[in-house]
Image (cartoon, rainbow, N blue to C red):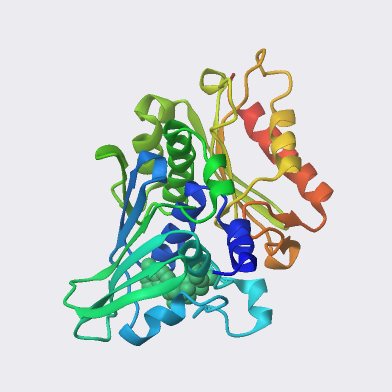
């Protein structure tokens, strides 16, 4: 692909975890209820995602890998009421531009499936193939043609840890989907897909951790909060279990992260951070999800008001626990 293509791809895909996030989101958008993710060498060697979703029609596979091809956005106004996780039609094109991809898929509406391969963004082969259900996409040799990026990837263990985190967040936001996450043939976690957030938390972090959490259920117009927050016994030295979702999307937001810590002021122990798995709901008009290609950062209009409401509600919940 042209340099410009690779640069654009590099905006969306910065490391193996970005591939996992985009492909898993596609599997979710496709209506899957079982998703299996296999990585090798921290995803650097391969990332394979299998789902049982609606699949892609034979003659639409190549199109799906073209830039700005999306089946999910009909009008620009739709951005305000996004139902699907993907909407830019950039992910597959970006991934394919900087790796070797094999995709097997069968559409619910067709008798036969297909297998298509791409190398550096170009389709190298396509054939009809019997396939049972859903989509199986395998991404190999990420950044093989972008040496600068390749050098920037971390040790296998580090990339694996980031992917683990991404997968955890995805699983937490979709308790109704059974996820299997496997790294170098070793099972990292499996969630049952029984629709209960509690089950996912227990699978990821253990039962005793779950027991240290208190249910959060609060409303302060126009904000709603649901999920769990921790007591003193669940405080941790890193912020890795401070997980916030806004309207179902995992986000990083500094203001809210600070507000969360402030709500525990007076209870925080030295160098410890409170934990929480929090689902915030805000009216779509208050969000700017278009800010960053990775969609991780989210812009909130009226951020300081939301920070205050959030801190108040968390504070109230903290005070109701006997710490
Ligand atoms: P977006 O998700 O923003 O639409 P992508 O590049 O991620 O863009 O995907 C392009 C299109 O390919 C999607 O709109 C969808 O139609 C199709 N697609 C991708 N992955 C899957 C999948 N796992 N199952 C079914 N369709 C898929
Ligand atoms: Mg997508």
On the image, which quarter does residue 33 sit in? bottom left
On the image, which quarter does residue 106 sit in? bottom left
Q: Can you give x and y, in whole percent of width and height, for residue 100 in the image?
A: 39, 61
Residue 186, above or below 280: above
Residue 37, above or below 255: below
Residue at figure coordinates x 65%, y 73% from the top left? 79
Count of marks overlaid on the render: 0
Query: Between residues 5 and 86, which one lies in front from this camera angle?
Result: 5
Query: Between residues 168 and 138, which one lies in front from this camera angle?
Result: 138
Residue at figure coordinates x 74%, y 56% from the top left? 299
Q: Does 259 sit left or right of 272 as displayed? A: right
Q: Can you give x and y, in whole percent of width and height, for residue 238 in the image?
A: 58, 25
Query: Between residues 184 and 97, which one lies in front from this camera angle?
Result: 97
Residue 36, above or below 310: below
Residue at the top extreme, as displayed: 270
Residue 294 visible here: no
Query: Between residues 45 and 201, which one lies in front from this camera angle?
Result: 45
Residue at figure coordinates x 35%, y 29% from the top left? 207
Residue 163 visible here: yes
Q: Can you give x and y, in whole percent of width and height, for residue 105 in the image?
A: 28, 73
Quarter that holds the N terminus = bottom right
Quarter that holds the C terminus = top right
Q: Does 289 sit left or right of 156 as displayed? A: right
């Amino acid at each position: 692909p042209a340099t410009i293509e690779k640069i654009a791809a590099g905006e969306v895909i910065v490391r193996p975890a970005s591939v996992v996030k985009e492909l898993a989101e596609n599997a979710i958008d496709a209506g899957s209820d079982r998703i299996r993710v296999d990585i090798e060498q921290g995803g650097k060697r391969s990332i394979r995602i299998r789902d049982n979703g609606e699949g892609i029609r034979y003659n639409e596979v190549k199109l799906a890998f073209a830039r700005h091809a999306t089946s999910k956005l009909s009008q620009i106004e739709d951005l305000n009421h996004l139902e699907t996780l993907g909407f830019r039609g950039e992910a597959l094109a970006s991934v394919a531009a900087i790796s070797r991809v094999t995709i097997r898929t069968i559409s619910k509406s067709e008798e036969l499936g297909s297998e298509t391969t791409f190398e550096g963004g170009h389709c190298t082969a396509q054939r009809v193939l019997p396939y049972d259900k859903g989509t199986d996409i395998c991404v190999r040799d990420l950044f093989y043609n972008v040496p600068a990026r390749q050098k920037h990837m971390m040790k296998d263990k580090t990339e694996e840890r980031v992917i683990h985190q991404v997968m955890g967040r995805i699983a937490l936001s979709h308790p109704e989907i059974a996820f299997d996450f496997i790294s170098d043939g070793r099972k990292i976690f499996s969630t049952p897909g029984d629709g209960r957030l509690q089950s996912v938390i227990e699978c990821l972090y253990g039962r005793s951790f779950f027991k240290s959490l208190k249910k959060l259920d609060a409303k302060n117009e126009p904000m709603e909060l649901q999920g769990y927050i921790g007591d003193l016994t669940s405080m941790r030295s890193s912020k890795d279990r401070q997980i916030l979702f806004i309207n179902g999307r995992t986000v990083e937001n500094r203001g809210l992260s600070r507000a969360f810590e402030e709500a525990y002021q007076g209870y925080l122990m030295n160098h410890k951070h409170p934990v929480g798995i929090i689902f915030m709901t805000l009216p779509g008009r208050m969000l700017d999800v278009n800010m960053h290609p990775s969609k991780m950062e989210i812009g909130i209009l009226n951020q300081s008001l939301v920070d205050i409401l959030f801190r108040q509600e968390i504070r109230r919940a903290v005070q109701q626990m006997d710490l």
